[in-house]
Image (cartoon, coloured by chain):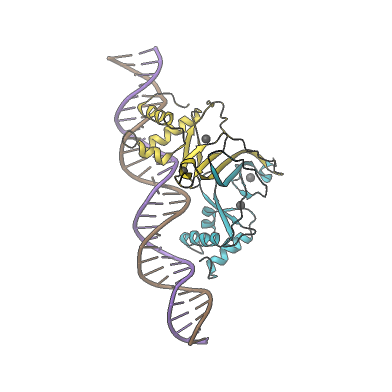
Chain colours: A cyan, B yellow, C purple, D brown
Amino acid sequence: MGIIRKTKSVELLLDIFSQNSNALSVVNLVKKTKNQMNKTTVYRILERMESEGVVHSFNDINGNKWYAKCHSCSSDNHLDSHPHFQCKDCGAIECLSVEIAIPKVPNFQIDSAEIMLVGTCRNCSIV
Amino acid sequence: MGIIRKTKSVELLLDIFSQNSNALSVVNLVKKTKNQMNKTTVYRILERMESEGVVHSFNDINGNKWYAKCHSCSSDNHLDSHPHFQCKDCGAIECLSVEIAIPKVPNFQIDSAEIMLVGTCRNCSIV
DNA sequence: TTTGGTACTGCAACATAGTTGCATTAGATT
DNA sequence: AATCTAATGCAACTATGTTGCAGTACCAAA
Ligand SMILES: [Mn+2]
Ligand SMILES: [Mn+2]
Ligand SMILES: [Zn+2]
Ligand SMILES: [Zn+2]
């Protein structure tokens, strides 16, 4: 399973991710690549990239799917678990490398936490 | 603005929330009430209820919208800011009354945090 | 370098959540 | 009871994401 063949489409998407430090929404990726590939292909390649541990995915506050590069994941080990930050001015999302402590909650067995911090980013703070 | 008229539809939705301690998905509410009201009405009443501080909303891990009762909010003061828990077995969501500390992150002005804890709930833990 | 198996792609059609405009209905107020 | 207008129903729409299938292009083996 996973990315086996290095097709033109796969290489283009890998390229886009290598040039972006921020996360990218699927909607944005489909737009960006609409002259090069079909949207179905975008969705399917992203799925494969995620199962390979190349990227990880999450939903923004509007319920849309985003992807961002993984730093030390493989198809066996997915250890990218960190909060994200979305700017309510420009909509950009960044991965944050901070640890947020999740307390134990009685009666609940917690496996993971999806944390989206919302506010104003660096650029948009500059008035 | 907000809930001005106590219509049959408004009262039915208020009733459903009063009988449920858990959060409710819009999809579920539309299904539950499809013999009593149109789905557009459900969406619009929920919007009004939220702006009145009667309920608060958030998205689940699939990007779908959910609502839950507020405990001490009004149209002026929305202070319901707490994590939620979604059971990956049964899909149910509960509001959690625990505090999770958000650290300061340099270069980001954080206004709020959307936190969804994922795992197994009480009922589903019982094998 | 050709050949062949199959992973991958494009396309069209579909599924589902959520939104909008507008004519009609039914609360509230007098 | 009359009136004003918030609220509703309906139909049509937008957007994101998914599926089946026929055809294409990678890659490895010959
Ligand atoms: Mn990330
Ligand atoms: Mn809640
Ligand atoms: Zn910004
Ligand atoms: Zn459960």
Picture coordinates of residue B78 (x, y %)? 56, 29
Q: Is residue D7 above or below residue A89?
A: above
Q: Is residue B107 above or below residue A68?
A: above
Look at the image and tell me in which quarter the C terminus of chain A lies: top right
| Horizontal relation, residue B71 to residue B41: left or right | right
| Horizontal relation, residue B64 to residue A125: left or right | left
Please tell me which residue lies in front, A57 or D29.
D29
| Horizontal relation, residue B56 to residue A68: left or right | left
Q: Is residue B64 visible?
A: no
Q: Residue at x 43, y 28 (%)?
A: B18
Picture coordinates of residue B38 (x, y %)? 35, 36
Tell me which image quadrant ligand 3 sits in: top right
Q: Is residue B16 visible?
A: yes
Circle count: 0
Q: Residue at x 41, y 41 (%)?
A: B27
Q: Tell which residue pokes out farthest to the right in this image.
A: B106
Picture coordinates of residue A94 (x, y %)? 63, 49
Please tell me which residue lies in front, B74 or B22.
B22
Quadrant of the rendered image containing residue B12: top left
Q: Tell which residue pokes out farthest to the front in this image.
A: B127
Quadrant of the rendered image containing residue B5: top left
Q: Is residue B80 above or below residue B106?
A: above
Picture coordinates of residue A108 (x, y %)? 53, 41
Please tell me which residue lies in front, A97 or B36.
A97
